[in-house]
Image (cartoon, grey):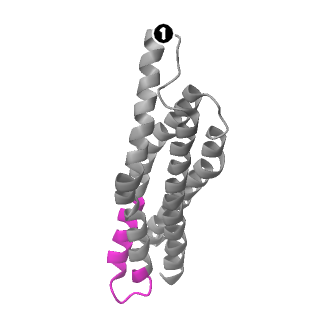
Amino acid sequence: MASNIDWLRALELANLLGIAHLAGYHYASDQIAVPNILKLRDESAIVDQWFCGWDVGRKYGPAMVSGTAAIFGFLAWKDGLRSSAFPYHLAASILVGLIAPYTQLRVFPVNDKLLAEHETIASRRKKTDDTDGTTSIEELHGWVAEWKRLDFHRQLMVCSAAIVGLVAATKS
């Protein structure tokens, strides 16, 4: 029975599940978590809630992005240039792989602002009961809204890669 298993197809299916999970993660962030953060009217609550999501994402995101991109790339290489699945696996690999530089160039600057405010509030918490930061609610909302917009771009890349990867699976 084990000799009948097509391990490349199993890997492809597992990778499709991984990229679909990553797409769902981004959707939940974009449609559930961040909109609720934007409803908050307390500086401390805004940065604390954003930090909770960011803290999960900084651990989960890089592993999922690099893992799925690498597997799509491996599948493209295994397909070979003449395979009808090759351009789709390659495109999916590139789409997912672009998330890393996009995140570093576009999202990190916004992360840095929010992280600095989180650190300011956390250090004030240790000294006094004053939990307000140095930034206005409007400015914090602006940063979180900008982060949401940039995260939506990453969501589009992930969803596009999932669709292209699914097309590749039908061509394999």
Return the x and y of residue 50 as percentages of the image width and height: 53, 37
Find residue 170 and report its horizontal and vertical position in percent: 54, 80
Residues drawn in magenta: 67-87
Seen as rendered, the residue at the extreme top is 128
Q: 14 or 29: which is nearer to us? A: 29
Residue 1 in magenta stretch: no
Pick out the residue farthest to the bottom: 82
Q: Position of residue 108 (x, y in %)?
A: 38, 47
Residue denoted by label 1: 128
Vertical arrangement, residue 73 with respect to residue 125, above or below? below
Residue in the picture at 44% in, 12% down: 126
Q: Quadrant of residue 70?
A: bottom left
Q: What crowding class fits label 1: few (fewer than 14 Cα within 10 Å), some (14-19), or many (20 or more)?
A: few
Q: Residue at x 54, y 55 (%)?
A: 149
> The residue under label 1 is which amino acid type?
Thr
Residue 82 lies in quadrant: bottom left
Q: How far across and down, in percent of the image, does residue 141 sit? A: 57, 41
Of 76 and 13, which appears nearest the observer? 76
